[in-house]
């Protein structure tokens, strides 16, 4: 057998009022479950594609488990150790795996389809689970979809300034963020959730020390417009799992806007043991478009 593919929609019709037309009428059952197709070009089904070419999606079409991981404790220098900064000179990123950061990661650039190496990854690299002998059908693995906002930590004597962070999201889409560290402020948190970090470049010079680390602000793999379209379980607690929710940016994204799919802040500190589970219910108006499911274009 091979993959059977056709352009839908598919309707399985029936009536609960009478089963005269079909005495075996009942619920439809699917081996292995059913899921929501990833409509984006690199991940969608291409008619006539060879066996093994990825056709991707999420398990389920509602109440989708999109994140299932135990994030490491946030750390102020997890990405770049304490150092003086020079305008236009990239900070030295960590070279040893630890504090929830994996060194030497690589990702396929969503736009160019080329492989980018030498990156830092937040947790494990994003991955998919494959099915069948050829592995054509692939579901996004929620245990690998953790993405976090970053932080810049200075000292009381710091003059403050902008840090330009470049990297990629969980799908390999390039993204940037400018985090403005205020003068004399200990820590400034970013608003975008990064999966991979390529560089941190200060836009000013200061002889005082700064470091770059992780926060307990997490990104959502599927666009969220309303707090009610997600359910979060952290450390086996539902009602008090999050303290902050920021909806997806729906206008044009830039280096200073928020996350294109939205973020959540957890109610207690991550520690590498407490499990974060996020269930998402895409809005009816959003399921039929790439922008509806994955947000406006990253910047």
Image (cartoon, rainbow, N blue to C red):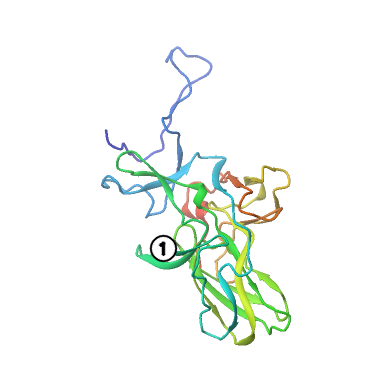
For label 1, the residue is 106
> Residue 64: image x %, image y %?
54, 42
Q: Residues within 10 Å of mark 1 (few under 14, many from 20)?
A: some
Between 4 and 77, the one nearer to me in the picture: 77
Based on the displayed image, in which of its 4 quarters is residue 208 positioned?
Answer: bottom right
Q: Secondary structure at mark 1?
A: strand
Q: Is residue 10 visible?
A: yes
Residue 270, image x, y percentages: 65, 55
Whether residue 299 is situated above or below residue 284 in the rendered picture: below
- Quarter of the image where the N terminus is located: top left
Q: Seen in the image, is 69 located left or right of residue 245?
A: left
Image spot of residue 279 (x, y percent) = 59, 44
With 95 as the anchor, is 148 left or right in this view?
Answer: right
Q: Kindly identify the residue that appears in the image at 59 percent across and 85 percent down.
A: 204
Which residue is at 69% across, 56% downward? 269
Q: How many marks?
A: 1
Q: Residue drawn at (41%, 61%), measured in percent from left and top?
A: 107
Q: Is residue 195 left or right of residue 241?
A: left
Can you give x and y, in whole percent of width and height, for residue 113 in the image? 35, 62
Q: Is residue 110 something that shows in the picture?
A: no
In the image, 246 versus 101, the foreground residue is: 101
Q: Residue at 58%, 67% (x, y): give it.
A: 78
Look at the picture and state if 263 lies above or below 29: below
Q: Is residue 287 above or below residue 192?
A: above
């Amino acid at each position: 057998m091979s993959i059977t593919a056709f352009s839908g929609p598919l309707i399985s019709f029936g009536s609960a009022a009478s089963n005269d037309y079909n005495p075996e009428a009942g619920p439809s059952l699917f081996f292995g479950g059913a899921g929501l197709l990833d409509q984006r070009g690199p991940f969608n089904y291409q008619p006539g594609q060879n066996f093994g070419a990825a056709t991707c999606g999420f398990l389920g079409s509602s109440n989708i488990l999109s994140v299932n991981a135990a994030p490491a404790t946030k750390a102020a220098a997890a990405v770049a150790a304490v150092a003086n900064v020079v305008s236009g000179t990239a900070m030295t990123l960590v070279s040893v795996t630890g504090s929830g950061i994996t060194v030497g990661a690589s990702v396929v650039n969503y736009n160019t389809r080329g492989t980018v190496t030498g990156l830092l990854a937040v947790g494990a690299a994003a991955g998919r689970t494959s099915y069948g002998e050829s592995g054509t059908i692939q579901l996004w693995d929620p245990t690998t979809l953790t993405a976090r906002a970053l932080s810049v930590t200075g000292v009381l004597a710091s003059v403050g300034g902008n840090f330009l962070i470049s990297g990629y999201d969980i799908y390999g889409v390039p993204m940037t963020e400018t985090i403005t560290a205020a003068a004399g402020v200990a820590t400034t948190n970013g608003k975008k959730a990064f999966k991979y970090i390529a560089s941190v470049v200060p836009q000013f010079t200061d002889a005082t020390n700064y470091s770059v680390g992780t926060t307990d602000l997490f990104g959502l793999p599927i666009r969220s417009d309303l707090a009610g379209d997600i359910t979060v379980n952290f450390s086996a607690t539902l009602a008090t799992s999050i303290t902050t929710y920021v909806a997806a940016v729906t206008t044009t994204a830039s280096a200073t806007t928020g996350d294109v799919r939205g973020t959540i802040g957890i109610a207690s500190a991550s520690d590498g043991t407490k499990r974060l589970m996020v269930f998402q219910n895409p809005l009816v108006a959003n399921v039929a478009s790439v922008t509806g499911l994955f947000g406006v274009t990253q910047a």
